[in-house]
Amino acid sequence: MLVIDTLMDPPLQVVIKNNRAPAFRFLMEHGMYFPEVVSPFPTMSVNFDTTILTDTYCDDHHLPGLIWFNIKENRLINYGSHIRELWKLGLSRSLEDILFHMNGDHISKGV
């Protein structure tokens, strides 16, 4: 599966028609293309990628966004907005959240 953030169908169709996107043309001709996909809200990669991969919304998969407040742990979770924010929250803690806790603990076991 290939998800391209912020790519809209109308401009893509223009560049394909003008032979300026041969790789996209190839992928669309040899795969499946869904031009009318609407991303869930909020439109942040962690949220909508998880929604697409689990076929559930964030109220079910429990990853509400790139940055969110974890009530159980009484702390801010940041999966990678900017190095400054990660540093301020604690780089090792942030890396643990990104590499282990997002999929190991934070996402709902039910999905």
Image (cartoon, grey):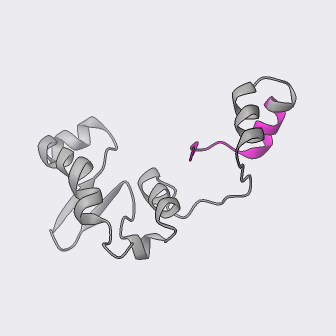
Residue at 69% over, 28% down: 23
Location of residue 3 in the rendering, given as x and y in whole percent from the top left corner: 57, 46
Location of residue 99 in the rendering, given as x and y in whole percent from the top left corner: 24, 47
Q: Nearer the viewer, residue 101 or 72?
A: 101
**In the displayed structure, would residue 101 be above or below residue 110?**
above
Location of residue 68 in the rendering, given as x and y in whole percent from the top left corner: 31, 61
| Quadrant the C terminus occupies | bottom left
On the image, which quarter does residue 2 sit in? top right
Residue at 80% over, 43% down: 10
Q: Nearer the viewer, residue 66 or 102?
A: 102
Does residue 33 appear to the left or right of 39 in the view shown?
right
Location of residue 69 in the rendering, given as x and y in whole percent from the top left corner: 26, 65
- Segment colored magenta: 1-15
**In the displayed structure, would residue 76 be above or below residue 3?**
below
Q: Residue furthest top?
A: 20
On the image, which quarter does residue 21 sit in? top right
On the image, which quarter does residue 86 sit in? top left
Residue 10: in magenta span: yes
